[in-house]
Amino acid sequence: MLKRSGAAEPRTATGSNVAAGIHSLDHFAFDVPDLDEAARFYSDFGLEVRRVEERLELYTWGNPHCWARITTGPAKKLRYLSFGAYERDMPEFERRVGEAGTERCAPLADGGGIWFLSPDGLPLQIKACAKSSPDRKTEFSATTSPPGKAGAIRRAEAPVAKPRRLAHIAVFTTSISTAIEFYGQVLGLRLSDRSRDIIAFMHGVHGSDHHLIALISSGHAGLHHSSWDMPTFHDVGLASQHMIEKGHAVGWGLGRHLLGANYFYYVRDPWKSFAEYSADIDYVPAGEEWPASDHEPDDAFSFWGPPPPDQFAHNFEPAPGSE
Ligand SMILES: [Fe+2]
């Protein structure tokens, strides 16, 4: 059983006043039935797709960090989440996993660390590694033209907009409250905002976007969307148009979220989960408290924008035992 909320949080081995917590979502992994289809989709999306042995790896251009691994399976299925932490905090995570009575699992990737299951049975890794999440609010620039200059160029000359980094992951969970407690007590994440038992957003304590993980209510675990940071609102729009022209016609946006305040456009992938272009998300500096609130469902999804497509929040992954 997890400890009750409100228990005193342990401190880092260095005596920092920031309680031990993971610092990054290092990468995520999922299965799809067709790797070639995945390579096409994520290449169109603006990522560098590399084939490594029997899997695909997703990179943002010019950045050596691997953000995702895709392997072959009978259906699209989230396999695991890998979180990064400081080496000094690893004994504390080991202690917490033991104290929570969390079930361990076999490693599903290299990198060592601690492997265990979430309350929904999703494999999680915490490993010591470099911080891949931003140390400050990511630069966001407006595209504006000076007086006397044209603000647009010919469409044929428009560059393909490319994401800069993985921003966050949104996963399905069977209990929002249990997940908040688990990710808080074991991984040291903090609640940013929630809406009833529908959705919740959590951030890291070492300087983090408003959320590096979002939790969405469902009957079983699964991947709802991955989110990728874009430098400007114009890039979000340009990329959305590019995906439509590539035949990825179902999406949601352009819009602006309320919880996190990021501009967005979601593209439905071939397996009915989503990849999100995101820009200018709120940021929680290291050591600062974020005033978490429970919001009305009407305020949970967008500040402005069109209605989402049908079954936007539906979990299309097979339930355990149905595969
Ligand atoms: Fe998102």
Image (cartoon, rainbow, N blue to C red):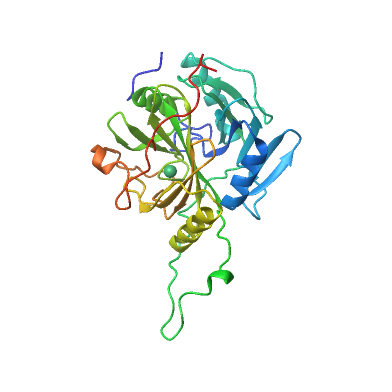
Q: Residue at x 70, y 44 (%)?
A: 50
**Percent coordinates x, y for residue 199 in the rendering:** 34, 34
**Percent coordinates x, y for residue 293 in the rendering:** 27, 38
Q: Nearer the viewer, residue 152 or 146?
A: 152
Q: Residue at x 48, y 13 (%)?
A: 101
71, above or below 64, in the image = above
135, above or below 129, in the image = below
Ligand 1 positioned in quadrant: top left
Q: How many marks?
A: 0
Q: Quadrant of residue 81?
A: top right
299, above or below 161, in the image = above
Image side of residue 298 versus residue 107, left or right: left
Q: Please, which residue is most extreme toward the bottom here?
A: 148
Image side of residue 171 versus residue 158, left or right: left
Do we see residue 305 in this rendering?
Answer: yes
Q: Please, which residue is most extreme toward the right here?
A: 53
Q: Quadrant of the N terminus?
A: top left
Q: Quadrant of residue 162?
A: bottom right
Q: Nearer the viewer, residue 97 or 245?
A: 245
75, above or below 300, in the image = above
**Percent coordinates x, y for residue 88 in the rendering:** 58, 33
Q: Quadrant of the C terminus?
A: top right
Q: Residue at x 44, y 77 (%)?
A: 145
Do we see residue 129 in this rendering?
Answer: no
